[in-house]
Image (cartoon, rainbow, N blue to C red):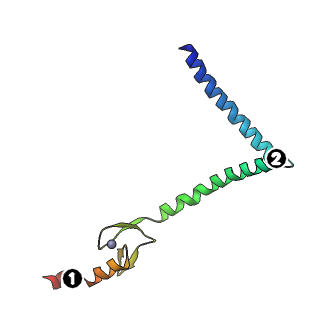
Amino acid sequence: MRQILLLIFLFFASQWVFRKLRRATERTAQTGPQPGAGNSTGTAGATYRRSGRAPGDAPQLTDPLVRCAQCGVHTPSSESLVVAGKRFCCSDHAHRYAARPTGRDAR
Ligand SMILES: [Zn+2]
């Protein structure tokens, strides 16, 4: 049992050392006078991933789902149509909603 715990501890310790070494190599690659081809692409990919997250989350927050007044389907506000203050999933439903008889005429 002690041996298993020791192995787990060694596993985490090696991971920690590996991370430290990685950071050290990244720093040397950035501050180095001549960045190698492999190192430059690695750092570029890391920065791209960090910067790519923010724009990916933004559209979801600024594009809420709206309910179609005709069929009740939820569609993104950018894809929905607004006709006479009502939101629709497609132009066909907007026409149907406008063409349908109103409450007074139906009764
Ligand atoms: Zn619809």
The answer to which image quadrant residue 16 occupies is top right
Indicate yes or no: mark 2 CB to ligand 1 under 8 Å: no
Residue drawn at x 61%, y 28% as measured from the top left: 12
The answer to which image quadrant residue 91 occupies is bottom left
Across and down, in percent, residue 107 comes to: 12, 82
Mark 2 or 1 closer to N-term? Answer: 2
Judge by depth and name the residue closer to the eye, 98 or 38.
Answer: 38
Residue drawn at x 37%, y 72% as measured from the top left: 89
Residue most extreme to the front: 38
Across and down, in percent, residue 85 comes to: 35, 78
Across and down, in percent, residue 77 comes to: 43, 70
Pointer 2 with pointer 1, Cβ within 8 A: no
Residue most extreme to the right: 33
Residue most extreme to the top: 2
Which mark is on residue 102?
A: 1
Which mark is on residue 31?
A: 2
Residue drawn at x 64%, y 56% as measured from the top left: 51
The relative height of residue 65 versus residue 7 in the rendered view (above or below) is below
Judge by depth and name the residue closer to the eye, 36 or 30.
Answer: 36
Identity, as a three-letter code, of the amino acid under mark 2: Thr
Q: Label 1: how many residues lie within 10 Å, few (<14), some (14-19) or many (20+)?
A: few
Task: Name the secondary structure under disc 2.
Answer: helix
Identity, as a three-letter code, of the amino acid under mark 1: Thr
